[in-house]
Amino acid sequence: MLTTNTVAHAESLFSPITQEDESIFLTDTSDHRNLVDKKTDLENDMDDFNIHFDDLYAMKLLMKLRSEPVTYTVAEGDNLYRIALANDLSLNELMDMNNITGDLIFPGDELIVKQGTGDLEDTPKRQVMGVTAPPIEPVAPSAASTPNTASTKVATSAPVVTAEPKTEGSVEMTMEATAYTAYCTGCSGTTAYGIDLRANPNEKVIAVDPRVIPLGTRVWVEGYGEAIAGDTGGAIKGNKIDVFIPSYDNAIQWGRKQVKLIILN
């Protein structure tokens, strides 16, 4: 390392040589050896400086090429959907980035929200503690038209209904089902699970009683298809559900009916 003493040492060697110095230099061989030794020491110091400088440059270059992943520590009330939205990620991107195989997270869990750069193949992905539930599979969206702002009704096609899944040992229930929209009186458009229904009108979401069906559960509803239990409601108690339908007219047409519900996870 180039120290203050080294700099002073170098300056002394480059100071002008007087006539008296020259005569000493020519007559005293020990001073000549000292001067040669000083010159050698300075050259060694400069070599060390160049080595350290090269190392520093290489280190800075490496830091530019490689960076650590950016992480987020889960807080009380967080969910994967909100964390993904806050970090400009899709839900699937966030889950893939963290090797998550379900939608359960707990306060204190550490999630990667921005992958580091560099040799990513040698960097193991971090696991999220306590994640045991199966992943939420996205449902194929149906075509949607421009909302009618005059009546605050969202004009879309009827929801795509998937066939009843063939699953052995699944829990089946009979539920009383009604329908709701994201623009109902007093509705914010964001569900209890954090899903923005106004921004995502083609999401398949049902409101449930969490004591009967926990939030985040994937279900299949007769006449509605696969959905996520992602909302709650004051009138949704016991074996009652409310299915989200973006179109006001289609929601009214749904009415109130008895439907079969199958728990998928």
Image (spheres, grey):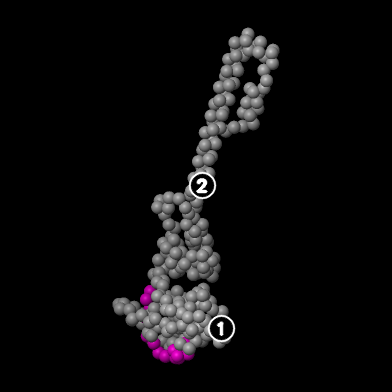
Label located before the other in sequence (1 or 2): 2
C-alpha separation, residue under disc 1 versus residue under disc 2: 51 Å
Q: Which quadrant holds the C terminus?
A: bottom left
Q: Is residue 139 magenta?
A: no
Pinpoint residue 4: horizontal percent, then vertical percent.
64, 31
Quarter holding residue 219: bottom left
Foreground residue among 204 and 77: 204
Q: Nearer the viewer's eye, disc 1 or disc 2?
A: 1
Q: Does the magenta stretch include residue 256?
A: yes
Tag 1: amino acid: Thr
Q: What stretch is highlighted in magenta?
A: 251-265
Pinpoint residue 31: horizontal percent, then vertical percent.
62, 14
Pinpoint residue 161: horizontal percent, then vertical percent.
38, 82
Q: How crowded is mark 2: few (under 14 residues within 10 Å), some or many (20 or more)?
A: few
Q: Is residue 211 visible?
A: no
Q: Which quadrant holds the N terminus?
A: top right
How many marks on residues?
Answer: 2
Pinpoint residue 101: horizontal percent, then vertical percent.
40, 66
SS label for mark 2: helix
Q: Can residue 8 be seen in this view?
A: yes
Mark number, residue 149 = 1
Q: Residue at x 52, y 61 (%)?
A: 72
Q: Residue at x 43, y 79 (%)?
A: 143
Q: In this view, does 174 lie to the left or right of 30?
A: left
Outermost residue to the front: 146
Foreground residue among 12 and 233: 12
Mark number, residue 50 = none
Q: Residue at x 62, y 10 (%)?
A: 26
The residue that label 2 is drawn on is: 63
SS label for mark 1: loop
Tag 2: amino acid: Met
Q: Mark 1 touching mark 2, by CB under 8 A?
A: no
